[in-house]
Amino acid sequence: MDIAAQVSGHLRKLAGVNLCDDCLAEDLDLSRRQQAFRVTSALGTTGEFTRERGTCDKCALEKLVTGVKPHEPACLNTLSVTRLFTEHAKIEAELRARNVIRSANSPVGDYAETLFCTAFGWQMQGASVKGYDALDSENVRYQIKARKLNSEKTSRQL
Ligand SMILES: [Zn+2]
């Protein structure tokens, strides 16, 4: 394995840990600190790693340190509605797998109400209104039910 692969692999394994070139050279048993320096200088220019002045997590000295860049949380307000539902489905699946939640329906009902009210020009009623979800222009009440078809279940009954 070449030195670049050794250094980047080591930093990925220690994700979140920032190391100075001396400690990297020591960890990887590199013969010269310059070898680590050449690699970390290059890594610092990539999107995956940071290289900046900071505290080395091993020797605790204030130096130039290199580490894996922390993942930025997704900027939700830049995502499309489709993408938000996709991410939401993934989160729900994970929460179900951990037995945190049991239903897979949660935002679906609200979304169905929005769709029906937009399509038919109904007036959506707030959550405080019991028994119906929308009113049309003649004050006819509608209750809107929806269910997400889940690949884990085969029933199509509402
Ligand atoms: Zn160090």
Image (cartoon, helix red, strand yellow):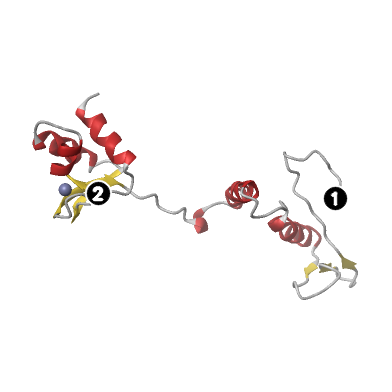
Image position, residue 5 (x, y; %): 26, 30
Rendered image quadrant of residue 136:
bottom right
Residue 4 relative to residue 133: left or right: left
In depth, the one of 77 and 6 nearer the eye is 6
Q: Is mark 1 within 8 Å of ligand 1?
A: no
Image position, residue 104 (x, y; %): 71, 51
Name, please, the residue furthest toward the top.
1
State the CA–CA distance, disc 2 to disc 1: 53 Å
> Please, what is the three-letter code of the amino acid marked with disc 2?
Asn
Image position, residue 106 (x, y; %): 70, 57
> Please, what is the three-letter code of the amino acid marked with disc 1?
Leu
Residue that badge 2 annotates: 18
Q: Quadrant of the N terminus?
A: top left
Check the image and report above or below for 53 versus 3: below
Residue that badge 1 annotates: 158
Instruction: Please name the residue shown 23% across and 51% down the image.
Output: 57
In depth, the one of 54 and 136 nearer the eye is 54
Instruction: Please name the residue shown 51% across and 56% down the image.
Output: 76
Check the image and report above or below for 114 versus 6: below
